[in-house]
Amino acid sequence: MPEWLVYTLASVLVCLLVIATTVMRHRRVAADEDTSETPDVLEYMVMMVGVVYAIVLGLAIAGVWEARGAAEDTVQREAQALYEIDQRLDVYPAAFRAQVKEHIDAYARHAVTAEWPAMKEDVPVGSTGAELLGRIRSDIAHHTPADELQAQAYQPLLDQVAAADDARHQRLDSAGTTLPGAVWFGLVAGAVVTLGLLYTLQIRRSARELLLATTFSSLVVFLLFLVWSFDAPFGHSGTDSAQPLSDLITPTV
């Protein structure tokens, strides 16, 4: 399900719940009940809970944002290392260049088409990617430099393979959700408590107050959706985060 659809459905459901709760509450209010006064202790509780929840929510957003940025940098480093290997092969014979480039293309294609869906589902990716990267390392390591230029490019090429391997391991380690279940429980429970306290403030069924309450509820839903969206460093759907590796794949004619 697309992320925008998830957010839209969640917002609509919460807004409908807000309106229905407010209407049902006022239908049950006694005729002589004074809705113009709010206990001071309740206002204090709303203020304190709101501030604490805002801090926790802000820390959660900052944490998942940082994890998403680190994941994007890891993919960029992996793709850059493979690109450097491709570019530094110009001092080698054409047949050897074609062989290594074919293996780079196979590795990038496997990473995008097989490993990304596995990372999205948080399941093991298997050993195929490591084997394909090992073929690139083996190609370079077992090719004897024929002249000074090839000898100078030999070690930097192996260093780039090591850099790609290191970035790949970091990418796989970063797959899955960032926040533990206990944090998610706190975020959802905090949202329920915050909104619940808001509606105990004896909101009257005026258009202005109902609009403000609905807007505030939508904002809370949006912030929770933002945390959920960034909680998966490589995204919940699609392979947009794999674009640097996708650029290495040779288009099929």
Image (spheres, grey):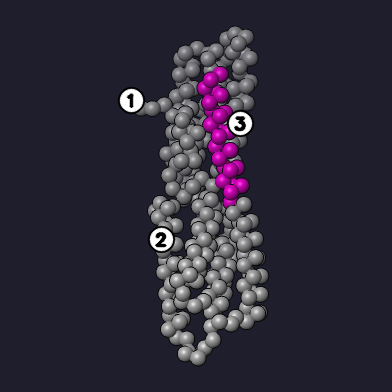
Q: Report, in whole angstroms, how far the alpha carbon at label 2 lies from the one at label 3.
A: 43 Å
- Is 83 one of the magenta-colored residues? yes
Closer to viewer: mark 3 or mark 1: 1
Is the residue marked by circle 3 packed among few (<14), some (14-19), or many (20+) residues within 10 Å? some
Closer to viewer: mark 2 or mark 3: 2
Q: Which residue is mark 1?
A: 253
Mark sitting on residue 9:
2
Closer to viewer: mark 2 or mark 1: 2
Drawn side of residue 63 relative to residue 86, left or right: right
- Any part of residue 231 in sight: yes
Stretch of the chain drawn in magenta:
64-88
Asked which secondary structure carries label 3, the reply is: helix
Query: How many numbered marks does the figure carry?
Result: 3
User: Which kind of residue does numbered mark 1 sit on?
Assistant: Val
Horizontal and vertical percent position of residue 129: 49, 36
Q: Which residue is mark 3?
A: 163
User: Which kind of residue does numbered mark 2 sit on?
Assistant: Leu
* Secondary structure mostly seen in the magenta stretch: helix
User: Which kind of residue does numbered mark 3 sit on?
Assistant: Ala
Asked which secondary structure carries label 2, the reply is: helix
Q: Is residue 48 above or below residue 100?
A: below
Asked which secondary structure carries label 1, the reply is: loop
The residue at 56%/77% (across/down) is: 201
Write down the quadrant of residue 59 in the picture: bottom right
The residue at 65%/65% (across/down) is: 51
